[in-house]
Image: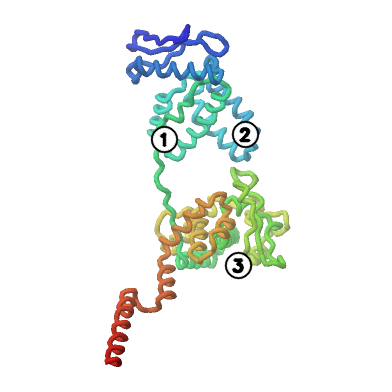
């Protein structure tokens, strides 16, 4: 071992506690507590950690671990990282909520080097007991890892313990896909809800819910993209055919850019959705180019998501549609999956959906083949007609045999 480097076993109230000491790149003596034997620390394990630190000093110029608290560093990170990365406003707000709502209350007073795997695992256990979902916990771990990686790049910590944590397993996502008959049943239920109310405000809310439902099913756009639509982006009289342009989204009660670069897209409209949007604009009190397509009928502000969900659930119940259906997200999934079943090419499907990765689009294509068995039946009918495969093989076997017998009789 180099001079000044050693493994130390300290015998205290908690039993044996293992420590290391070494000289950092600045020539400063560093003494660091690794942990007690009760948490699995041994002399051999401590020696491995010491060697890793000596290598980091030699290769990376590692310095003494920072005495800065997690809260102080996290606040500095929030003030600089989003700007450096050019993150969207909604992403910044999400990071802030995670840091202030989850990470600082747990790790805020600790020094950066004191955030260990064991402490992170205790954090996960506590949050799971409070009812946080695996997906939420993994998002908090992602942000924690980003913060510690920033400290690691500045030489303030030696390792990123988040990378060693066993993450909560997220359950497989289940999508409730509406079939074409189910979609028609919901549309009919919405029409009935509109017809049976005498309240003008209620009727207006139900009418806009119906048009939103048809637009989600007909285009596959996201809920935030629908609320971000202005009439200037809906070109129903375009010489090349009616289209909508996705240029803005409404997220966290404010306008923002689309989810990704692929989210900026143009979507061709069929005649049915074109007619519905045209009639919706004619009925609306907010029809100017800079006003919202799906605005509150009385104020023009983005239509309330809870109000939309309440009305749609009434229609789903009336149509006897079973299962837990998310009012916008599952309609988007339904639209894209039905489009895949209808034979839209993967490239066109990816562009229409605004996916950045083909792997995402591929899930819809696979689901279409699994869900819509009628497509497989129609393919077989086209290839083989009404006869089954077994009969086809029987005919193929029988025909050569008959021909062979006739030839034999002729030559005989």
Tag 3, which secondary structure?
loop
Q: Residue at x 43, y 71 (%)?
A: 379
Q: Is residue 357 above or below residue 101?
A: below
User: Quick one: 314 or 63, which is closer to the camera?
Assistant: 63
Q: Is residue 196 left or right of residue 271?
A: left
Q: Residue at x 56, y 27 (%)?
A: 150
Name the residue beneath numbered marker 2: 82
Q: Quadrant of residue 179?
A: bottom left
Tag 2, which secondary structure?
helix
Q: Residue at x 42, y 30 (%)?
A: 165
User: Quick one: 223 or 23, which is closer to the camera?
Assistant: 23
Name the residue beneath numbered marker 1: 167
Q: Residue at x 32, y 18 (%)?
A: 38
Residue 158 is situated, as x and y percent measured from the top left of the image, at 50, 21
Q: Quadrant of the C terminus?
A: bottom left
User: Quick one: 109 or 84, which is closer to the camera?
Assistant: 84
Q: Choose the circle earlier in sequence order: 3 or 2.
A: 2
Q: Quadrant of residue 368?
A: bottom left
User: Quick one: 317 or 201, which is closer to the camera?
Assistant: 317
The local crowd at label 1, few if under 14, some if 14 to 19, many if 20 or more residues have their Cα within 10 Å, is some
Separation of disc 3 and disc 2 at Cα? 40 Å
Residue 394 is situated, as x and y percent measured from the top left of the image, at 30, 78
Name the residue beneath numbered marker 3: 270
Residue 152 is situated, as x and y percent measured from the top left of the image, at 54, 24
């Amino acid at each position: 071992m180099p001079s000044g480097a050693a493994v130390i076993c300290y015998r205290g109230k908690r039993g044996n506690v293992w420590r290391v000491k070494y000289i950092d790149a600045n020539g400063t003596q560093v003494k660091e507590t690794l942990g007690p034997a009760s948490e699995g620390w041994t002399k051999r394990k401590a020696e491995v950690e010491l060697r890793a630190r000596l290598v980091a000093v030699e290769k990376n110029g590692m310095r003494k671990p920072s005495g800065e608290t997690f809260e102080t560093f996290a606040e500095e990170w929030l003030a600089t990282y989003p700007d450096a990365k050019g993150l969207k406003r909604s992403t910044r707000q999400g990071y802030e909520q995670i840091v202030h709502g989850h990470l600082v209350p747990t790790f805020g007073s600790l020094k950066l080097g004191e955030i260990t795997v064991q402490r992170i695992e205790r954090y996960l256990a506590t949050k799971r007991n409070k009812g946080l979902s695996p997906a939420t916990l993994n998002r908090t771990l992602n942000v924690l890892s980003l913060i510690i990686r920033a400290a690691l790049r500045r030489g303030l910590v030696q390792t990123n313990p988040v990378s060693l944590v066993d993450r909560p397993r997220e359950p497989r996502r289940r999508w409730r896909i509406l079939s074409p008959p189910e979609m028609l049943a919901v549309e009919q239920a919405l029409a009935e809800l509109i017809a049976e109310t005498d309240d003008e405000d209620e009727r207006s809310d139900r009418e806009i819910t119906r048009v939103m439902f048809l637009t989600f099913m007909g285009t596959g756009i996201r809920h935030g993209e629908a609320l971000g639509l202005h009439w200037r982006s809906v070109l129903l009289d375009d010489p090349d055919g009616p289209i909508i342009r996705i240029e803005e989204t409404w997220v966290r009660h404010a306008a923002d850019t689309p989810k990704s670069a692929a989210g900026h897209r143009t979507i061709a409209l069929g005649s049915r959705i074109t007619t519905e949007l045209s009639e919706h604009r004619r009925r609306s009190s907010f029809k100017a180019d800079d006003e919202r397509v799906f605005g509150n009928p009385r104020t023009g502000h983005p239509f309330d998501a809870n109000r939309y969900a309440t009305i749609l659930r009434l229609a789903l119940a009336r149509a006897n549609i079973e299962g837990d259906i998310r009012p916008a997200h599952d309609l988007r999934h339904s639209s894209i999956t039905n489009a895949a079943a209808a034979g839209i090419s993967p490239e066109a499907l990816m562009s229409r959906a605004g996916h950045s990765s083909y792997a995402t689009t591929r899930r819809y294509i696979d689901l279409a083949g699994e869900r819509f068995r009628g497509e497989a039946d129609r393919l077989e009918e086209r290839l083989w007609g009404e006869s089954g495969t077994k009969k086809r093989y029987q005919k193929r076997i029988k025909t050569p045999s008959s021909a062979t017998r006739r030839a034999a009789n002729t030559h005989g």
